């Protein structure tokens, strides 16, 4: 399972403040903590705190200095993304990275695919387009197939393509859970080998009471359907334990009585 | 989800002793406790303590007296099963019941199906035959389809047929977890509406360290694949909470902030 730590995001108060005040310490601490907790990638996002390319570059540099963990460079403005990726190349060289994200929108898909090619990165493709987020399975799969086709044609191999079926809040759109699981199952059949399938997990428990329980239950179900990546709270021990156990059941990690410890140290 | 409480089984020391000494209290206490915990059925099994039809009849009577919860009448001897079902009819009348279990073996399948027809019960069909337990998906599905066909032809509707894919210990047969999940997915396509799909859950964690975690992770994955019944430890609160959450995600129970409480009271 590819665990992408969600915590370095300007939407969290401490990170937002650190970005504004250019304080490296709180950011670098989260980079280290998430890495120790087992994060394979660290998502790095300004949130609503800033739209400045300089701030994004500073944030990326700050994280790259602190840990060797690969980044998921996360923003939805093309101009910011270009600046961020250029900075990443300067400071991290050929370190692996994920570009987070494109959609199937005409104005985004080709430019983002080109950036993924240019910077030798993985690319998350969120299955929405000009018409918004799909509610049904078919449209999710249609948009996933479109993103996959465009990315493949440009030279991205399946292991560099991450399809995101768009997880929706259980509390408000309860019927969408099943649709997302079925879309994941169908994404896994788009090619052989399949693309990665990634979820933005925390959306599932939005405004709900039993957040941790809902997160880990959904993620385990998504893994059974073929999901192999998640942007999530890697500091949630019960979540990571559930992931480690699901990996055993899917025969992707080898059983030992101390498999929970082993899973954290896998990197 | 159909939760079948596993605890009234002579293999547990306290139940074994109670059967030998004909003490009703410990047995009736477990009947009540499991019912309160949310059991839909109570599995009733002599274990290795006795092979006497009188003891089985006594055990069934003892449980039926204590609670109105339906039973899963569980033994692998035809003679005992006949006695048990006759007793069940005498003491519980037309109360629903599950007959646990037949296999696809020639010597068992028709007799057990006939008992299910005669006593108006559900029937668990474990997908093994004279050649033993299958290791692969295809043979599980082949035997499941055979049991389903014979039971259907005799008049059992899909809602009275429970296919059991045979869960195996993760610690010793790690590759079987995936096969069981895939078999469940295929069982769910045997008919429309599908038969029930039931697992003997506790086998998955045999001799492992993280028993509760492995149980609930596997069950949630099995539910995502189509499993809708489990013989399990209903006293395990975290297991039942995981089941309740999976039911929400599958849109089978309605979300409320207090859904965990609501799930326990659903009966």
Image (cartoon, coloured by chain):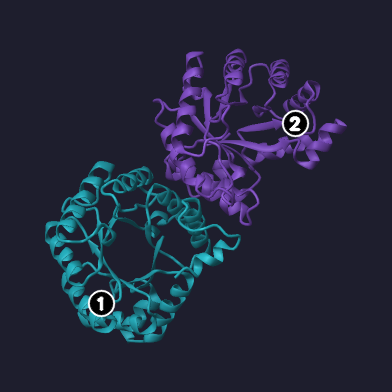
Chain colours: A purple, B cyan
Would you say B2 lies left or right of B108 here?
A: right
- Can residue A247 be seen? no
Would you say B182 lies left or right of B128 here?
A: right
Q: Quadrant of residue A80?
A: top right
User: In the rendered view, would you say A130 is above or below A94?
Assistant: below
User: In the rendered view, would you say A35 is above or below A123?
Assistant: below
Residue annotated with mark 2: A46
Secondary structure state at the residue bearing disc 1: loop
Q: Nearer the viewer, residue B91 or A48?
A: A48
Q: Residues within 10 Å of mark 2 (few under 14, many from 20)?
A: many
Would you say A16 lies left or right of A104 here?
A: right
Q: Position of residue A212 (x, y in %)?
A: 61, 52
Q: Quadrant of residue A188?
A: top left
- Can residue B259 be seen? yes
Q: Residue at x 79, y 33 (%)?
A: A49
Residue annotated with mark 1: B50
């Amino acid at each position: 399972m590819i665990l992408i730590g969600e915590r370095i995001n300007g939407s969290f108060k401490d990170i937002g403040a650190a970005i504004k005040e250019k304080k490296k310490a709180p950011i670098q601490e989260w980079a280290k903590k998430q890495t120790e907790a087992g994060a394979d990638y660290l998502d790095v996002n300004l949130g609503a705190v800033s739209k400045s390319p300089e701030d994004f570059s500073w944030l990326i540099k700050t994280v790259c200095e602190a840990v060797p963990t690969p980044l998921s460079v996360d923003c939805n403005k093309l101009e910011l993304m270009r600046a961020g990726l250029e900075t990443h190349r300067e400071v991290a060289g050929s370190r692996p990275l994920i570009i987070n994200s494109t959609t199937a929108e005409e104005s985004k898909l080709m430019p983002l695919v080109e950036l993924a090619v240019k910077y030798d990165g993985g690319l998350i493709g969120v299955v929405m387009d000009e018409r918004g987020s799909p509610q049904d399975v078919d449209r999710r799969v249609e948009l996933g197939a479109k993103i996959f086709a465009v990315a493949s044609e440009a030279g991205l191999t399946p292991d560099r393509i991450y399809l995101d079926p768009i997880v929706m809040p259980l509390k408000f759109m309860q019927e969408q859970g099943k649709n997302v699981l079925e879309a994941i199952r169908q994404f896994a059949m788009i090619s052989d080998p399949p693309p990665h399938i990634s979820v933005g997990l925390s959306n599932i428990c939005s405004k709900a009471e039993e957040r941790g329980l809902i997160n880990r239950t959904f993620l385990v179900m998504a893994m059974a359907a073929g999901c192999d990546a998640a942007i999530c709270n890697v500091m949630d021990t019960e979540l990571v334990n559930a992931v480690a156990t699901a990996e055993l059941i899917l025969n992707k990690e080898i059983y030992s009585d101390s498999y929970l410890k082993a899973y954290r140290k896998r990197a």
